[in-house]
Amino acid sequence: MVTATLAELTEKGYDQLTVDAICHRAGVHKATVYRRWGGVDGLIADALALSADQPWPIPDTGNVDEDIQLLALEVYTTFTDPDLRTTPTALIGAALRSTLGAAALSAFFTARHQQAAEIVTRAVKRGQLPASVDPVELVRAATAPLYHRLFITGEPLDEPAAHRAAAAALLAARASLFDAAAP
């Protein structure tokens, strides 16, 4: 069902997404969808939940500056590459319009940030960042400006913006602005 949901969402957008079309594509009866997912929003939430469980390529170059830059570039590429961007953009856009989807999107980003926090944990062990740094906060700071442009302001996203976001997050971490012990 997730594949059919994502395909329909990508092709038609949230406003045209229907249980009937998803069921037709998946070859299942709509009673099954309503019983298990409750409707379109439940399917979107499920797609995000399943996506959160998928591994994310976390860089490990041995240098935190390069790793955080590569992480920001991964987000940039995912949302700017014509072959990659349509489905994740449609899924996030749909999730922002649904209570179930918004909760699933929050859980999705929590999982992604936890996975990417390994970059920071390794850097602390290598002495490249202060031991007090909150790994998840650094990851959020390195990627949030990109999502802000994409989903809040609609500004174009470019590679220099990804580099600036990563560099700013690293500067803040080195200045102890992401101290895990801070209130």
Image: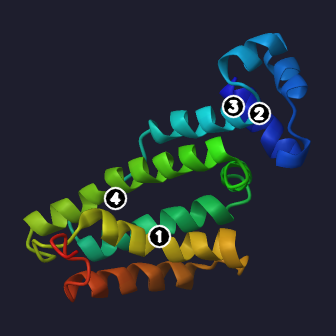
Q: Secondary structure at mark 2?
A: helix
Residue on which the image places disc 4: 59
**Residue 164, placed above or below residue 16:** below
Residue 87, x across and y down, in percent: 71, 48
- Distance, label 3 to label 1, CA atoms, is 26 Å
Residue 175, x across and y down, in percent: 21, 89
Residue on which the image places disc 2: 40
Instruction: Please tell me in which quadrant of the rendered image residue 10 appears.
Output: top right
Tags 4 and 3 in contact by the CB under 8 Å rule? no
Residue 85, x across and y down, in percent: 69, 56
**Is label 3 or label 1 in front?**
3
Mark 3 burial class by Cα count in 10 Å: few <14, some 14-19, many 20+: many
Residue on which the image places disc 1: 143
Q: Residue at x 30, y 81 (%)?
A: 170
**Is label 1 or label 2 in front?**
2
Label 1 sits on what residue type? Thr
- Distance, label 1 to label 2, CA atoms, is 28 Å
Label 3 sits on what residue type? Leu
**Residue 49, placed above or below residue 142:** above
Residue on which the image places disc 3: 43
Tags 1 and 4 in contact by the CB under 8 Å rule? no
Tags 2 and 3 in contact by the CB under 8 Å rule? yes
- Quadrant containing the C terminus is bottom left
Comes first in the chain, label 1 or label 2: 2
Label 2 sits on what residue type? Val
Label 4 sits on what residue type? Pro
Q: Residue at x 51, y 52 (%)?
A: 106
